[in-house]
Structures are given as C-alpha cells and as structure tokens.
C-alpha cells in the first residue's frame, strides 16, 4: 500500500512550560511541516530524508534501544515504532520545510507524520499522546504533549487553546490583521534536555509542597512556598496560566496591543522566574519590540536558545537582520493522511 502523510510544525503563542504541569497553552500549527511518502508492507523500515545525509534503516524483527540508533534522526523513527508497534514497516521518503532542531517542533512533525504513515489509527489526541511517548523514548526529555497535539489537531486560521489536564482543544480565530513572525536566534539549545528535566522536577516539587496542582494555585498561595527557586518556577506557571486566558480574551476581542503586552510579560516571566532565556534571546526580543507594527515578542518553545515569536500587525515590516532567519507563519490545519494506491 502506498500512502502519504503530512504533519505541520508549531509555534507556541503563549503558555510556555505549563503543559507538563496540567496548565494551559496556545500553540498554532504552521504551514511549515514534514511529508512522508511511504510504501507499506515489509518487516523493516527504510527512510531517506531530503535534509539528512544518511538514511535510517530499522529491522522491526530485532528492535534496538531507540536512543542508540544511528544516524541520530533515526531515534525518532525508532521511538515511534516503540510507541505504536506497527504491524508492518515499509520504505519511503521524508521531505521537510521545517528548520531541524530550531524549536518549531520538527521532531513532533516527523513523529506524527510517521505514525500515520505506519498505519496509526485514532483521534488526534491518541495520536499526539503516542507521539509524545515516542519523543520521550527517543530524546530522554520528559516533554509535555503540546507540540504533538498542535501538530495533530491544528486548525487553519486558528490558534489552539489547549487545557493540558482535560486535553480539550478549543480553536481561537486569529484576528484578520494579526501577523505572526518567527525568528530563529541561531543559538543552539545547549543542554536544553537536562535543564528541561530540572525545570519539570522543580515545578513538580512545588506542587508537592502545595499539596495540589499548580493550575489550582493562586499567586498568594505560591508566594508562601519556602524555597526561592521553587517559588519562582511556580509563580511563572501560575501567572502564565492567567496570561493565557487574558491572551485568548484579547485575541477574541481583536485587541492586538493587549495580546502583545501579555506576550512581553510572558517573556519577562520566563527570563526572571523560570530562568530559561538567554542574553541573546532577551536582546532579540527587545529589538523586535522596537520595530514598527510589532506588539510583543517572546522566546517560544523550551528556551535556552532556539526561536522567538513576535505578535505583529499583518503588514509590519520587520528588519530582516534581526536573528538568523525569519518566517512569517500562518495557522494551518493539523496532520493529514491519504492512501495513494492499495
Ligand atoms: C518543548 C516541549 C513542550 C513544552 C515546551 C515548553 O517544546 O516539547 O512539551 O513543554 O517545550 O513550553
């Protein structure tokens, strides 16, 4: 059987480092993504990529530790295989328009497209949870579900308000005049894996000290947490959840200034309280804010380098020299799958 599967990358507008606390996020799937053409029906997987020098070859009959697979992009392939246990493999070609490893969820797009190509059937949430598991297996990073769910459940022209406790996905229309610019800082996300794990452990410790989930905590309750680092991490999560709701109200009202102000506030909180920014990301966010037509800018994704997102007027002219690369992104539909030949 010959199939084709496509999965988009994502940019997160607001709600950072909240998904794994059961909080709220507002990502949108974007027009950049990964497409796999795949011929199913053999007991191995062979994939060639247009951006990777070496192909991935995996024998389904003798599984290996996904984290030892070479070339390294094959770890995500092995992670998907471990997570969904497909009936058959196949061979195919991977094409991507996403920058790899820049923070636009190129790995989530690969996982989601591959799971569909390998025959995964189920609703977007089940697909996203399987691919989250694949990502954790492949990378060892205890990531949340935001990236995979945005890729699986994207809606054209809408951002997605996701409740990461109930996993409800509520599409929020992108106002007509709003533009979204993604800026790659060019800074490698050094040590992001281990630091991400530390942050996750800190917010879990904070919740344990409180005795209830952070999404139920008030700023006042969080201010009584004894340890300084845990208190600041928890304060970020609690204030970020509040900002998410205010941001969604601002978008629904078409108030880009207010939405941009919340985006700026999110960056400050990620810098001061969650401590995942870098001097370069701070400088680039400042430079973006000075551009005419830009309402707000913040780091997006895990931080420690990677990309920024700027909330702009649709016709804003942003100096192309800010950052290493820039993309104007549109909110796109989620993953798609089609049988080309039986
Ligand atoms: C990465 C993870 C997500 C989320 C963000 C931070 O992108 O994969 O689950 O935690 O970082 O918001």
Image: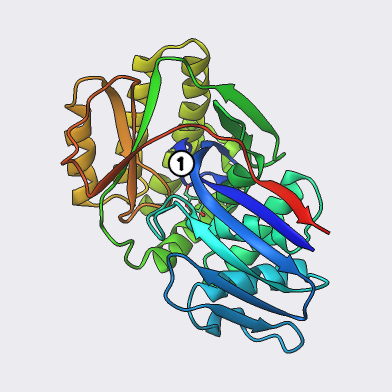
Look at mark 1 in the image and give the residue it sits on.
11
Q: Residue 112 placed where, x, y %?
A: 64, 55
Q: Residue furthest bottom?
A: 62
Q: Is residue 57 left or right of residue 249?
A: right
**Residue 227 is at least partly visible in this image:** no
Q: Is mark 1 within 8 Å of ligand 1?
A: no
**Residue 193 is at least partly visible in this image:** yes
The kind of secondary structure element at disc 1 is strand
Task: Check the image and report above or below for 221 versus 179.
Answer: below
Where, quadrant-wise, is the N terminus in this rendering?
bottom right
Colour scheme in use? rainbow
Q: Residue 192 placed where, x, y %?
A: 38, 63
Task: Check the image and report above or below for 62 versus 53.
Answer: below
Q: Residue 186 placed where, x, y %?
A: 25, 55
Viewer-proximal residue among 45 and 20: 45
Residue found at x 58% / y 37%: 215
Viewer-proximal residue among 228 and 318: 318
């Amino acid at each position: 059987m010959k199939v084709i599967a496509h999965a988009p990358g994502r940019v997160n507008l607001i709600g950072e480092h909240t998904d794994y606390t059961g909080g709220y996020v507002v990502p949108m799937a974007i027009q950049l993504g990964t497409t796999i053409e795949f011929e199913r029906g053999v007991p191995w997987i062979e994939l060639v990529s247009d951006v990777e020098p070496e192909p991935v070859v995996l024998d389904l009959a003798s599984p290996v530790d996904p984290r030892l697979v070479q070339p390294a992009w094959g770890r995500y392939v092995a992670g998907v295989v471990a997570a969904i246990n497909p009936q058959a493999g196949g061979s195919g070609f991977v094409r991507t328009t996403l920058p790899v490893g820049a923070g636009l969820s190129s790995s989530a797009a690969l996982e989601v497209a591959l799971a569909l190509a390998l025959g995964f059937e189920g609703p977007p949430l089940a697909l996203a949870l399987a691919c989250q598991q694949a990502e954790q297996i492949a990378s060892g990073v205890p990531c949340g579900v935001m990236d995979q769910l945005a890729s699986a459940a994207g809606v054209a022209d809408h951002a997605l308000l996701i409740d990461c406790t109930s996993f409800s996905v509520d599409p929020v229309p992108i106002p007509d005049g709003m533009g979204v610019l993604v800026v790659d800082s060019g800074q490698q996300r050094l040590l992001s894996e281990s630091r991400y794990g530390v942050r996750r452990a800190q917010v879990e410790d904070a919740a344990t000290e409180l005795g209830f989930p952070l999404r139920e905590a008030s700023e006042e309750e969080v201010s009584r947490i004894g340890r300084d680092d845990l208190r600041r991490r928890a304060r970020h999560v609690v204030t970020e959840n509040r900002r998410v709701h205010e941001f969604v109200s601002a978008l629904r009202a078409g108030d880009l200034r207010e939405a941009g102000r919340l985006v700026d506030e999110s960056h400050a909180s990620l810098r001061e309280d969650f401590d995942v920014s870098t001097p370069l990301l701070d400088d680039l966010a400042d430079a973006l804010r000075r551009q005419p037509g830009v309402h707000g800018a913040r780091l997006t994704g895990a931080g420690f380098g990677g990309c920024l997102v700027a909330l702009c007027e649709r016709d804003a002219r942003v100096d192309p020299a800010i950052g290493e690369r820039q993309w104007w992104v549109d909110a796109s539909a989620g993953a798609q799958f089609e049988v080309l030949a039986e």
